[in-house]
Amino acid sequence: MKINKYHQKDIKEDYVDIHYRELNPQISGLFEYLDAMNTVIGAKDQEQRIIHLSEIYYCEVVDRKCFAYLDHDVYELDFTLQGLLETYHANGLIRISKSMCVNVFKVLRMDVDFNMRMKLRLTNGETVLLNRSYKNAFMKYIRELTGRDES
C-alpha cells in the first residue's frame, strides 16, 4: 500500500482521504482503527460498553461524574467534561452550559428561550438548554461546520 503524507499549514481542518481498489484485511483494519478513535467506553450496571460518538446526544456532569445520554440509555464515562471536549470537540461535541455538552449532529431545532438562552430540540425528542454565555461559541461552531464561518 502506498502512503502519501502532506503537511499543509493553510488548511482549516486536518483530513484523510483513503482510496482503495478492494476491501482487504489491511484496509478493514485501518477503518477499524479510525473508528476506534471515535469511541468511548461507557459503564452501566457494572458492565462496560463501547459507545460510538455518533450515539451520544449529550453529556452531563452530575455529582462530579460525567454521563453520556444515548437514545434510550445513560452511561457513565471515565472523563471530565473538559477532557471529553478537548479530545472530541472536532467530532461535534460542544459545551452548552457549565455542566453539559451536546452533540451538534443530534440537534434538530433551536428555539429562542427567555433570558437570551436557547432551547435545543434533539432528534430523540429531548430538549436541552443552551446557556447564554455559551451561545456565541455554539453558533460560531455551527457556522464552521456548515461552512458559513464569517471570521
Image (cartoon, rainbow, N blue to C red):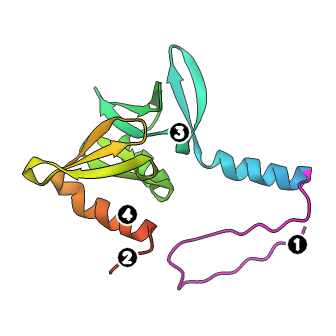
- Mark 4 sits on what residue? 142
Up-down: is 86 above or below 77? below
**58 drawn magenta:** no
Number of numbered discs overlaid on the protein picture: 4
- Mark 2 sits on what residue? 149
Upstream in sequence: badge 1 or badge 2: 1
Q: CA distance from mark 2 to mark 4?
A: 8 Å
Q: Which quarter of the rendered picture does the N terminus lie within?
A: bottom right
Q: CA distance from mark 1 to mark 3?
A: 33 Å
Range of residues picked out in magenta: 1-24
Disc 1 crowd, CA 10 A, few/some/many (<14, 14-19, 20+): few
Mark 3: secondary structure? helix
147 or 89: nearer the viewer: 147
Mark 1: secondary structure? loop
Name the mark nearer the viewer: 4 or 1.
Answer: 4
- Mark 1 sits on what residue? 2
Residue 114: image location, x then y, percent = 9, 48
Name the mark nearer the viewer: 1 or 2.
Answer: 2
Q: Main secondary structure of the magenta part?
A: loop
**6 drawn magenta:** yes
Return the residue found at the far left: 115
Are the two marked residues, 4 and 1, in contact with CB atoms closer than 8 angstroms?
A: no
Left or right, residue 100 beside residue 71: left
- Mark 3 sits on what residue? 55
